[in-house]
């Protein structure tokens, strides 16, 4: 799956269109180039370093160890704020949870089984 | 998939949990997947030890994220809710959930939460999206646990005094 790299040369003030998105070279100042991007509000635009940072963090999280012991001796959650939770948001998660509860097979913390779940082994 | 007249269920294969079934209407759809996982579009949220849940992929048996309710962190996303987002079709007035991906590590003190790239899920249509906030105040590695003795006693004004 190869994607070619299209190289275009622009002068300050000139633009290109990517679909509906307009990219303008606003200013060139030494080694820095200022780009202006005109896109629909829902289009997500990120600096590459940030995008890669999140990509890496997601990857680590996906393969992360199982140690999510909520009740660990001597530790308390750091939620960074003592203000009450956002009401709209806090209602949301409980409405999304599946009623299924499970026991992990591998090296994870044991989850209390709420009811019998046929076929779950070990 | 079977339909009993009550709920349709979906069978999910998982390297962590073996095989299990979930109600079909509990599935959450991420049209763009997650960042770095563009093909992982279908997930289900499962109970784990509070305050954690699992966000488990339907398509990939090996893919699951530990998540925490973003509401636990207070109104840090105030003004940043992605209304108008095309993936979720989220509109003002819609009920939504914020899920924060947790990077769990063997040492609990190293377990961190990615506040910089939360997942927003529209409760109405069960569609989700991961949004990155280029905000220095939001860390990709917010440390989730701290030792009790490090907490200043004057903080946490609404704390009932009960500590886990």
Image: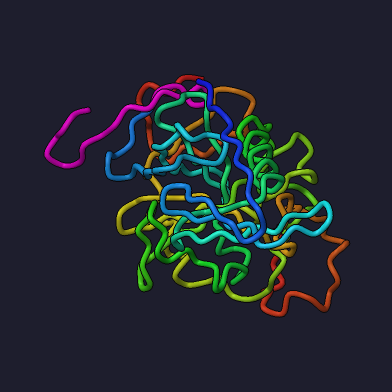
Q: Determine whether B66 is above or below A16 in the image.
A: above
Whether residue B51 is visible to the viewer of this picture, yes or no, is: no
Q: Is residue B7 left or right of residue A12?
A: left
Tell me where residue A9 appears, x and y as whole percent.
Answer: 63, 44
Q: Nearer the viewer, residue A89 or A42?
A: A42
Q: Is residue A64 left or right of residue B24?
A: right
Whether residue A5 is visible to the viewer of this picture, yes or no, is: yes
B2 within the magenta span: yes
Q: Nearer the viewer, residue A20 or B151?
A: A20
Q: Which residue appears farthest toward the left when viewing the image?
A: B5
Tell me where residue B63 appears, x and y as whole percent.
Answer: 52, 29
Question: How many circles with numbers are drawn on the protein?
Answer: 0
Q: Nearer the viewer, residue A109 or B10?
A: B10
What residue is at 47 percent from the left and 24 percent from the top?
Answer: B61
Quadrant in which the C terminus of chain B is drawn: bottom right
Tell me where residue A68 appears, x and y as whole percent.
Answer: 66, 41
- Would you identify the image quadrant in which residue B135 lies? bottom right
Q: Determine whether A6 is above or below B117 in the image.
A: above
Quadrant in which the N terminus of chain B is drawn: top left
Tell me which segment is drawn in magenta.
B1-19
What residue is at 50 percent from the left and 56 percent from the top?
Answer: A22
What residue is at 21 percent from the left and 37 percent from the top?
Answer: B8
Q: Nearer the viewer, residue B82 or A45?
A: A45
- Would you identify the image quadrant in which residue B44 lies? top left
B85 within the magenta span: no
What residue is at 51 percent from the left and 41 percent from the top?
Answer: B34
């Amino acid at each position: 799956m190869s994607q070619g790299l299209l190289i275009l040369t622009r002068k300050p003030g000139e633009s290109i269109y990517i679909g509906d998105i307009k990219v303008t070279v606003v200013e060139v100042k030494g080694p820095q180039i200022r780009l202006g991007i005109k896109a629909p509000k829902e289009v997500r635009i990120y600096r590459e370093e940030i995008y890669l940072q999140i990509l890496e963090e997601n990857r680590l999280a996906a393969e992360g160890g199982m140690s999510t012991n909520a009740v660990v001796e001597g530790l308390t959650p750091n939620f960074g704020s003592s203000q009450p939770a956002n009401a709209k948001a806090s209602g949301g998660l409980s409405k999304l949870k599946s009623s299924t509860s499970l026991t992990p097979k591998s090296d994870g913390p044991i989850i209390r089984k709420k009811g019998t779940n046929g076929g779950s082994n070990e | 998939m079977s339909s009993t007249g009550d709920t349709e269920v979906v069978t999910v294969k998982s390297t962590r949990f073996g095989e299990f079934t979930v109600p079909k209407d509990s599935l959450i759809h991420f049209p763009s997947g997650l960042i770095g996982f563009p093909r992982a579009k279908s997930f289900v949220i499962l109970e784990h030890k509070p305050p954690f849940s699992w966000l488990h992929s339907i398509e990939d048996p090996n893919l699951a994220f530990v998540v925490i309710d973003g509401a636990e962190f207070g109104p840090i996303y105030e003004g940043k809710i992605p209304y108008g987002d095309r993936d979720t079709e989220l509109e003002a007035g819609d009920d939504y959930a914020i899920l924060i991906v947790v990077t769990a590590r063997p040492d609990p003190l190293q377990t961190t939460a990615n506040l910089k790239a939360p997942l927003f899920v529209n409760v109405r249509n069960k569609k989700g999206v991961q949004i990155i906030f280029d905000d220095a105040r939001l860390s990709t590695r917010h440390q989730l646990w701290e030792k009790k003795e490090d907490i200043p006693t004057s903080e946490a004004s609404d704390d009932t005094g009960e500590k886990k």
